[in-house]
Image (cartoon, helix red, strand yellow):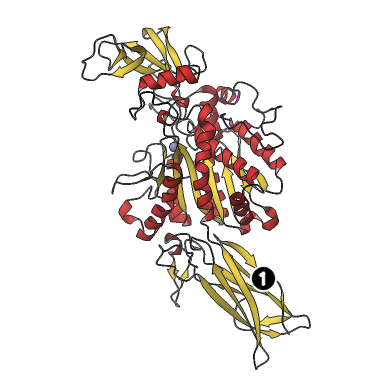
Amino acid sequence: MGRLSLSIAMPIPLVAWLLAGPGDLAAQAVSLVSPEGAVDWNRFYTAAETNQVLGEFHDLYPELTELYSIGESLLGQPLMVIEITNQATGPAEEKPALYVDGGIHAAELTGSAVATYLVGHLLNGYGTDERVTRLLDGTAFYIRPKFNPDGSDLVLLHDQPLRSTTRPVDDDEDGVPDDDPPNDLDGDGWIMQMRIPDPEGLFVADPDDPRILVRDEERTRPGPRYRLETEGLDDDGDGERNEDGIGGIDMNRNFPRNWERWHIQPGAGNYPLSEPETRAAVEFIDSHRNIGGIVHGHTSGGFVYRLPSASAPSLFPEDDLALILHLGEEYTRTTGRPVIPSSTDPVEHRYGTLISWGYWDQGVIGWVPEYSPGPEEWVTDYDGDGEISAAEELRFDDEELGGRYFVEWTPYDHPELGSVEIGGWRTRFWGQNPPPEFLEAEAAKQMPWILYLAEQAPRLELSGPTVTALDDGTFRVEATVSNTGYLPTSITDRGVVGRERADGTLDRQVVRAPAVTLTAVGVEIVDGPARRPIAHLAGSNQYLQAVTESSRTVSWLVRPSGAERAVRVTASADKAGTVQSGWVRIP
Ligand SMILES: [Zn+2]
């Protein structure tokens, strides 16, 4: 516990409790990755275990990975990123890249699982899977499986509900933050439901299987009535139970583009990037300009949220919307699941989301996959009516999963409520996330589209330089740079927004213009600077009217000034990588 700083505003008992789950998180004696790269993917891993998986993969594939921390969580855990590319074909920063994370929302554990699975899929696939091999030779991945290690550990180890970070928030405004979370009254390690006999209650027990509670607002069904509450006590004595749980900030409302204060956007935090986890994300993406796409993994729903996110749909550029719809088609084709807009209302929408910042401030397209559709994905439709009933869910859990995900209603003498029963679905792994038995299948399903997104990157190619002697003793050096990828070097229409120069080209663009640079030995460049910015280069996509030319020729005039004379050309584009010619002799 020595790494924990005492300066953080967190009750020390909570810190100790959170980080001391079952087993010592700091010391793991057992390998989680086999020498062949095999991992038990049908498991949810804590932050420490996930970092161990990353570390063991890094040891196994040192020529394909870099592993580093990009900051510390509120409770002092490292925020780990694994960088994956074939380093023999160039460093990551000289290649187009895709950023993938998971778990910004504490309970959305599948997001972290999919991101970790991607690490294994890429590394184990290099040299055996042709598609993966080609990708890692020309592309980089930055993968951050545990965006929010504190929050996800609190959920995984203690089943506490919280939206994001453990930063205390006084939800009930009684002057004391986090003083009435749910309580594990029966000590089984789970926060379950309490069914409380109540003549006014909305639920009745199903006569065919009294474990099932049927919602009966019309009050047409006979039988004892119940109301449901989350397992817990009135810890702060204000007459309400569980109304001031741990945390309260929603970190995906804490990003700096179109951020709004708490009274308009609940959970926003006190100011943009108030959280170390969100700040680390923005600093990392901003300083890795080769990132051309963001996959921000959430759970659940079984769909992908697309842009626009934190803005009115009418303000969103049409060309980019057409491109986004096109890129989303491949998700539906490979998963059978829909892509839906994150923002649909002209006025009301989310504020301060990561993908909104990524688009408006970095010019890149972000996606919010909500992994795992819910029980219909794994439960058998026994009667074949096309729907999964509560009875079918229970039967499947009973027969196929040993009844692990439904806790029998068990009498409990509640100090405030009298006789109640505690039980119900373990919804954390039956709805919000899939049961771990089905986790690998869910993760594997996401791979084709994630690889596809990486494959759409812009990609530079260089021809030349050619050298032509002129009559006045100078030479013209000429090179042509092309974008052979799908996306333009600006990625989006947003990327080419900038300040107009006198010559009609753009300066200070959202995505910096590509540049072609001449490196010369024994000659002097006589017609201007060595580094020549050029306009963005179109890819093969048809959507962007602001960028239409996919190649450009650049020339320099040079005059011999030394005995050994040679030139080479380097072309670079933030989102399309760097390519360099060999040396060409000047006669
Ligand atoms: Zn979420």
What main secondary structure does the magenta stretch of the protein show? loop
Look at the picture and state if 359 lies above or below 77.
below
- Residue 512, percent from left and from top: 52, 64
- Residue 534, percent from left and from top: 52, 72
- Residue 61: which quarter of the image? top right
Look at the picture and state if 89 lies above or below 206.
below
- Residue 459: which quarter of the image? bottom right
- Residue 55, percent from left and from top: 68, 38
- Residue 553, percent from left and from top: 55, 77
Q: Quadrant of ligand 1?
A: top left
Compared across the picture, whether 103 is left or right of 353 comes to right
Can residue 250 be seen in the rendering of this structure?
no
Pick whichever, 413 or 72, lies toward us: 413
Boundaries of the magenta span: 19-44
Look at the picture and state if 353 lies above or below 97.
above
Q: How many marks?
A: 1
Name the residue furthest front.
384
Which element carries disc 1, helix, strand or loop? loop
Q: Is residue 27 magenta?
A: yes
Instruction: Report the residue at 60% width, 42% height from top.
Output: 121
Look at the picture and state if 292 lies above or below 444.
below
Pick whichever, 193 or 61, lies toward us: 61
Compared across the picture, whether 246 is left or right of 582 comes to left
Amino acid type, residue under disc 1 in the picture? Ser
Pick whichever, 25 or 131, lies toward us: 131
Can residue 67 be seen in the rendering of this structure?
yes
Instruction: Report the residue at 50% width, 17% height from top.
Output: 402
Q: Looking at the rendering, in which quadrant would you find the C terminus?
A: bottom right
Q: Which residue is mark 1?
A: 581
- Residue 427: which quarter of the image? top left
Q: Looking at the rendering, in which quadrant would you find the N terminus?
A: top right
